[in-house]
């Protein structure tokens, strides 16, 4: 558990919330996800977390990255504590008369489940360097101390409980989000996603090609409503960071956002591509074609890219022996 070790990366920009709950300080906390920032730290801190569908939880008071991808969500030690009655806007989505907790069950009997192949859906050691033996333990091949891999055991257990079980459904991977030679989420978000960060580490020149999308406009809309702030524009933020360089991070990526020259048409076309791959021909298609309610796969994989691009909800929980 990341809260109890000095050598485990806590993962993601909501890691403070995750570590606080994991260490027993509050019973629950809020985090925010643009791509992976709830799921990754929640998983590493052994928590349950839920990134809701974009738009059903208010983002007021949260510094934005992209209005089409940001979502605030809870991080807890129990599934029941994930019930989001307090934070969900009931005018944006349906809420059960007696709250979300009232419709939770302790059975998989009504769920139709599809599973992704962990051999295909994972990050390389460059991004998530696991403890020795961890990947072998979870893999779908025999592990030295078990009759079969733990992932395989989890599949067998889940398949025995679910209403319907489909193994290794062909969901498009995050690699297919590339559009016109660039990661479409890069273009829309204006910074590196986890998947493209992997590529950038392998091919450094790609880092210089990162283009800026919604961030500048969204950031300045947020700061325009601040009363007691020295910063109200991205240019002012860059200047502030330069003047306080002994305390603040270098503003390299912020400078790229200032220099953005992407047209609205380019952003709209890129968003259309991202939605087509991730939602229309991705998550929604797999759910429909395979008659599923949910798709399960490794938390530390490009599943977060797909959820981010589509605007869909995602959650992190534990399925094991």
Image: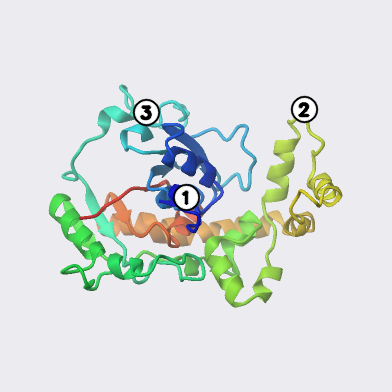
- The structure residue drawn at horizontal position 47% and vertical position 43%, both measured from the top left corner, is 18
Residue 291 seen from this side: no
Q: Is residue 53 shown above or below 151?
A: above
Marking on residue 227: 2
Q: CA distance from mark 2 to mark 1?
A: 32 Å
Whichever of labels 3 and 2 marks the residue nearer the N terminus, that label is 3
- Residue 140 image position (x, y, % from top left): 25, 70
Q: Secondary structure at mark 3?
A: loop
**Which of the 4 image quadrants contains residue 167?**
bottom left
- Count numbered badges in the picture: 3
Q: CA distance from mark 3 to mark 2?
A: 35 Å
- The structure residue drawn at horizontal position 33% and vertical position 25%, both measured from the top left corner, is 99
**Which numbered disc, 3 or 1, marks the residue closer to the eye?**
1
Q: Is residue 197 shown above or below 19?
A: below
Left/right placement of residue 253 relative to residue 316 reads: right
Q: Say if mark 3 contacts mark 2, CB within 8 Å.
A: no
Left/right placement of residue 118 relative to residue 44 reads: left
**10 Å neighbourhood of mark 1: few (<14), some, or many (≥20)?**
many
Whichever of labels 2 and 1 marks the residue nearer the N terminus, that label is 1
**Which numbered disc, 2 or 1, marks the residue closer to the eye?**
1
- Residue 248 image position (x, y, % from top left): 76, 49
Residue occupied by mark 3: 95
Residue occupied by mark 1: 41
**Which numbered disc, 3 or 2, marks the residue closer to the eye?**
2
Residue 29 seen from this side: yes
């Amino acid at each position: 558990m990341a809260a109890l070790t000095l050598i485990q990366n806590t993962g993601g920009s909501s890691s403070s919330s995750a570590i606080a709950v994991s260490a027993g300080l509050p019973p629950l906390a809020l985090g925010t996800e643009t791509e992976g920032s709830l799921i990754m730290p929640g998983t590493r801190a052994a928590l349950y977390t839920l990134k809701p569908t974009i738009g059903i939880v208010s983002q007021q008071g949260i510094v934005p990255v992209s209005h089409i991808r940001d979502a605030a969500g809870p991080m807890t030690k129990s599934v029941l504590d994930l019930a989001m009655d307090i934070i969900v806007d009931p005018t944006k989505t349906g809420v059960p008369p007696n709250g979300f907790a009232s419709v939770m069950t302790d059975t998989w009997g009504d769920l139709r489940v599809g599973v992704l192949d962990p051999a295909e859906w994972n990050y390389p050691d460059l991004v998530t360097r696991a403890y020795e033996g961890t990947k072998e333990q979870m893999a779908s091949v025999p592990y030295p101390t078990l009759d079969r891999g733990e992932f395989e055991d989890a599949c067998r257990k889940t398949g025995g409980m679910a209403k319907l079980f489909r193994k290794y459904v062909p969901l498009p991977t995050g690699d297919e989000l590339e559009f016109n030679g660039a990661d479409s989420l890069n273009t829309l978000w204006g910074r590196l996603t986890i998947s493209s960060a992997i590529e950038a580490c392998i091919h450094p020149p790609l880092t210089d090609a990162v283009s800026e999308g919604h961030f500048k406009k969204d950031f300045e809309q947020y700061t325009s409503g601040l009363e007691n702030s020295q910063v109200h524009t991205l240019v002012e933020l860059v200047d502030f960071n330069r003047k306080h360089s002994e305390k603040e991070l270098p503003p390299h990526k912020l400078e790229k956002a200032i220099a953005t020259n992407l047209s609205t048409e380019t952003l709209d076309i890129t968003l259309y591509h991202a939605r087509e791959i991730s939602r229309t021909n991705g998550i929604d298609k797999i759910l429909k074609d395979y008659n599923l309610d949910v798709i399960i796969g490794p938390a530390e994989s490009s599943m977060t890219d797909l959820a981010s691009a589509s605007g869909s909800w995602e959650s992190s929980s534990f399925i094991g022996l």
